[in-house]
Image (cartoon, rainbow, N blue to C red):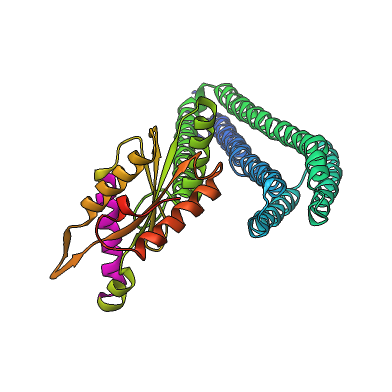
Amino acid sequence: MAKPYSSTNANPVRRGFSFLIGAAFLALIMLICGLLLNSLFQLKALGQQLNTVVELHNHKIDLITQTQVAAHIRTDSLFRMVLASDPFERDEHFLRFNHAGFLIGQGREALSQLGFTPMEQRNFDAQTRLMRRIQTVQEYVIDLLHANQNTLAHQVLAHEAIPLQEQFNLELAAMRTAYQQANLVAQQQAQHTYRHALLLTLTFGLAAIMLALLIAWYATRKINLKSRQLHAQMMELEQSRAALRIEATHDPLTGLANRRLFYDRLQQAIRHAFRYGGRVGILYLDMDHFKDINDLHGHHVGDAVLVEVTQRLKDCVRESDSVARLGGDEFAVLLEGVQGRQDCIAAALKIEQCLAHTARFGDLHLEINASIGQSLYPDDGSNEDALIRVADAAMYRVKSGCESERQSRLPFQ
């Protein structure tokens, strides 16, 4: 009689099958873990490369740009010191010269703290030696100015200081280009890392393909999120820079051009008029009894009056004219394309008529008036400082004169 089949006979088969399934499952788990660990490692490397692009290289580029701007200001201040004849004006340029030197040192120190490759360190050391030469020549120019050897100072500036500064600017530009190229290399490495991770993921077999696709989707989502964050940060940085540029050149209360921007525009207008034989007019305005308004009604009312004056000035000048607030209750108007002094007087009369109306500020009714002086290029001066001084002096003569027909009766010479 045959021996009946028992379950014990199947145990070896079951155990072999279970072992095979377990081994395959364990291999699959190890495959998935290897895929996960590799993906995480690659993503971490990609994040580090992107951080290098955004944080380190861009920070270095910003510091180099800051150093270039400060170096330009330093050379420009030295140039203006050579041209200036007024000791007070020369002292003002000397202060800007020293401040720019401080910014150069600060920028280079911050750049050095970020670290360099051996090649970058050699270039930085060469720039340091060049900076010492530039500093020596610039100090020599200043010593010549103090010794009233202006001609020799001008020659040293033109033949030594400026060429050295141009060489320094070229080296900074080369360094900035190198970091921009390094950014591009880092981006390419990040792309290569991403492609390598994707290729390695796809080779792990059919058993882990769903999980691999999930990880690839997760990685892509993270990269896109990082890209959007970086884009948002760059946009925010650009907006901050734009706001800083506006803040540096415009009055925060009225939004008008400040003294610095007005001087730049006036200088450009003078150059244009000099080249083409034109004329440039300046109106210098000072509010009458403005201190009384502040003392009696408070600075908030005074600020409202300044804003109202700003709006009236914009409404009664041409689009080609430039209005600026020089400080306190002082304003200036740049008149381009004028034919002569009568055009300046006509513009001053028009402004007086625009301002001479009662303004309402809540329950207050205040009269707004201003004393206006004017000057004309080239009749009253050949540079912006001379024109401003003449217009300022004319304004004070108007302020101390009669209250009617002031513009036509008082001389502006």
Q: Is residue 386 left or right of residue 239?
A: right
Q: Is residue 31 magenta?
A: no
Whether residue 259 appears in this view of the structure is: no
Whether residue 198 is situated above or below residue 296 in the rendered picture = above
Q: Is residue 301 on the magenta stretch?
A: yes
Residue at 23% across, 55% down = 355
Q: Quadrant of residue 221?
A: top left
* Magenta region, residue range: 297-314
Q: Secondary structure of the magenta portion, mostly?
A: helix
Q: Is residue 244 visible?
A: yes
The vertical placement of 296 against 389, above or below, is: below
Q: How many marks?
A: 0
Residue closest to the far bottom: 296
* In the rendered image, the vertical position of residue 114 relative to residue 193, given as above or below: below
| Residue 151 shown left or right of residue 270 in the figure | right
Considering depth in this image, is 13 or 360 the residue closer to the camera?
360
Residue 192 occupies which quadrant of the picture? Answer: top right
Residue 137 spot, x, y in % from top left: 84, 46
